[in-house]
Amino acid sequence: MSDPTYTPPKIWSFDAENGGKFANINRPTAGARFDKTLPRGKHPFQLHSMATPNGVKVSVMFEELLEAGISAAEYDAYPINIGDGDQFGSGFVDINPNSKIPALIDTTTTPETRIFESGSILVYLAEKFEAFIPKDPAGRTECMNWLFWQMGSAPFLGGGFGHFYAYAPEKYQYPIDRYAMEVKRQLDVLDKQLANNKYIAGDDYTIADMAIWPWYGALVRNVVYQAAEFLQTQEYTHVVRWANDIAARPAVKRGLMVNRTWGEPDEQVPERHSPADFEGKI
């Protein structure tokens, strides 16, 4: 076990044996580590992702667009196994130099457009198809307020609380208490907002919900970190109501399966190329 009285050295150095989940792929450098060409399908959009919360945001968005009858949003989705380091292949790094999922190519533009960062992808698709984002300036601003809230807040939930509570090689009270307090504060922010609103940004379902739900909806439904009892998430009754409402949406159920390679077979659609891929699974 690490020394709890650890004093940082004058100059930090990389320790490849620092333990914890994903330690085998973590490095302090960017860029491709090996050559690998990404597969390509026939549809306008090519998604390379994994069914983690950030990946689910985009697969849900695509499925919601298709559910709304926007056939131009057809897409192919290919899995990127971040545990195996697929995100460091040259083809993926060409789309996202930050080597994080999800990454998307829009083949309908000349030249083709690469889009990375989940929030950026949601905005790109919402604006391209004029869907799930308010058209009036005040409504759009409120939607963007909450989208950016998620982008700034989720690292405290995932890289902070989730890491130290579920993934760190040692459990120490200070980081767990610190991040648990912050996550509960964030849940309280959401609960107060949802007390007077059906959805995050108001009466309409938007990309703000699609961004926040995969993280905070999963937390209160005990899908990630198995920490619902520890955090007493049932206290946030408005968040729980909202989380369950969104979980019941058909497009969300499909989006959760895309690029999923774990769990029960009927929960997985590792590659998605057409609606037929979901047959017998819902």
Image (cartoon, rainbow, N blue to C red):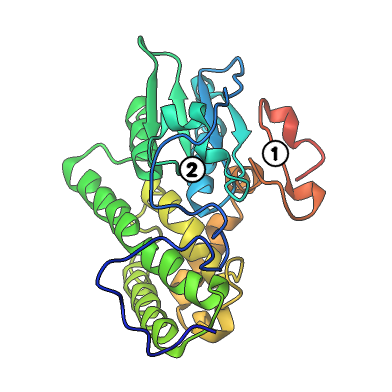
How many marks overall? 2
Instruction: Give amino acid for label 1.
Output: Pro
Q: Can you say which quadrant of the picture contains the C terminus?
A: top right
Q: In this figure, which residue is indicated by the disc labeled 2?
A: 101
Q: Residues within 10 Å of mark 1 (few under 14, many from 20)?
A: many
Q: Can you say which quadrant of the picture contains the N terminus?
A: bottom right
Image side of residue 51 versus residue 6, left or right:
right
Residue 115, by quadrant, is top left
Residue at mark 1 to residue at mark 2: CA–CA distance:
15 Å
Q: Name the secondary structure under disc 1.
A: loop
Foreground label between 1 and 2: 2
Name the N-terminal-most of marks 1 and 2. Answer: 2
260 or 234, which lies in front?
260
The location of residue 7, given as percent across then percent down, is: 32, 83
Q: In this figure, which residue is indicated by the disc labeled 1?
A: 270
Image side of residue 136 versus residue 26, left or right:
left
Q: Residue at x 54, y 52 (%)?
A: 25
Q: Residues within 10 Å of mark 2 (few under 14, many from 20)?
A: many
| Rendered view: 161 above or below 116 | below
Q: Residue at x 58, y 69 (%)?
A: 221
Q: Which mark is residue 223?
A: none
Residue 154, by quadrant, is bottom left
The location of residue 143, given as percent across then percent down, is: 28, 49
Q: Name the secondary structure under disc 2.
A: loop
| Rendered view: 125 above or below 258 | above
33 or 200, which lies in front?
33
Q: Residue at x 30, y 59 (%)?
A: 152
| Rendered view: 282 above or below 3 | above
Instruction: Give amino acid for label 2.
Output: Ile
